[in-house]
Image (cartoon, grey):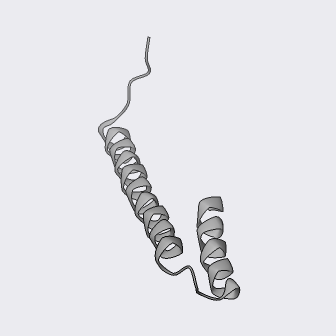
Amino acid sequence: MTPHRTRLQEVALGMVLLGVIFSSILYGVMISQTRKYYERFKKDQRIVKSMVFAVLWVSAQI
């Protein structure tokens, strides 16, 4: 038997689901942009490439 949820709880769960979906889409876009950066700008300095990787890594940890 499942516990009964109130209307407010159902709305809150829906908002959480939408947030997770939207966040996942944006994370996929960021990974795609990072991949394109590494493919297109192979001659960039190592420090710039390291900074791009660091931003990707930090955002993956959050």
Looking at this view, is 17 or 61 the one in front?
A: 61
In the image as oriented, which residue stretches furthest toward the top? 1
Residue under the point 65% across and 68% down = 58
Residue 40 at x, y percent in the picture: 46, 77
Quarter of the image where the C terminus is located = bottom right
Residue 20 at x, y percent in the picture: 43, 50
The image quarter containing residue 14 is: top left
Looking at this view, is 5 or 29 the one in front?
A: 29
- In the image, residue 43 sits, relative to residue 26, either above or below, namely below
Residue 31 at x, y percent in the picture: 49, 63
Residue under the point 68% across and 78% down = 50
Residue under the point 53% across and 73% down = 38
The image quarter containing residue 29 is: bottom left
- In the image, residue 12 sits, relative to residue 2, either above or below, namely below
Instruction: Tell how many labels.
Output: 0
**In the figure, is residue 9 to the left or right of 45?**
left
Residue under the point 31% across and 44% down = 11
**In the figure, is residue 58 to the left or right of 22?**
right
The image quarter containing residue 1 is: top left
Looking at this view, is 44 or 34 the one in front?
A: 44
- In the image, residue 46 sits, relative to residue 12, either above or below, namely below
